[in-house]
Image (spheres, rainbow, N blue to C red):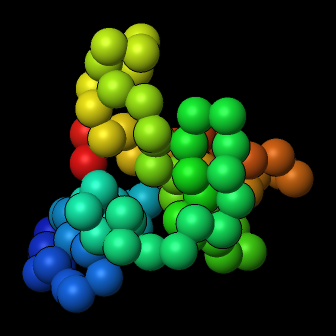
Amino acid sequence: MKRTTRSKSKCGFSGGPLGARGPLREYTAKALERRKTLVTGQCDDLKIRTSKTRVWLSRCGVEDGEPFDNKVTIEKLAGGRWVTVEEYPG
């Protein structure tokens, strides 16, 4: 299967290589900070919510115990539960 990439769009989405799992979504912290906060969690702000995906932006940094600053967490709905599928520095 030939792999392709998608270019970065205005919403902060930069598609990665396409494969069996589909596009690997990557939202930048800068783009997420511009979005309205839908829910405020203990350490993270929910910035994007669809029926099958949630994207959180952490308000904590390395000094607070996070693995990196501006952590972006992507969750997918699987079997009725939200499962973290990716975390990366924004």
Corner quadrant of residue 43: top right
Q: Position of residue 77 (x, y in %)?
A: 72, 56
Q: Position of residue 16 (x, y in %)?
A: 21, 64
Which residue is at a point 37% across and 63% down the rendered structure image? 33
Above or below — where is 55 with respect to 85?
below
Q: Looking at the image, which residue sits at the far right?
A: 80
> Can residue 87 be seen in the rendering of this structure?
no
**Which of the pair 28/84 is nearer the observer?**
28
Above or below — where is 70 with respect to 63?
below
Q: Position of residue 88 (x, y in %)?
A: 31, 39
Which residue is at a point 26% across and 48% down the rendered structure image? 90
Q: Position of residue 5 (x, y in %)?
A: 14, 74
Which residue is at a point 36% across and 73% down the rendered structure image? 34
Above or below — where is 71 with respect to 79?
above
User: For the N terminus, which image quadrant?
Assistant: bottom left
> Can residue 24 be seen in the rendering of this structure?
yes
**Which of the pair 86/21 is nearer the observer?**
86
Corner quadrant of residue 12: bottom left
Corner quadrant of residue 37: bottom right
Which residue is at a point 21% across and 71% down the rendered structure image? 14
Judged left or right of residue 9, residue 63 is right
Judged left or right of residue 30, residue 21 is right
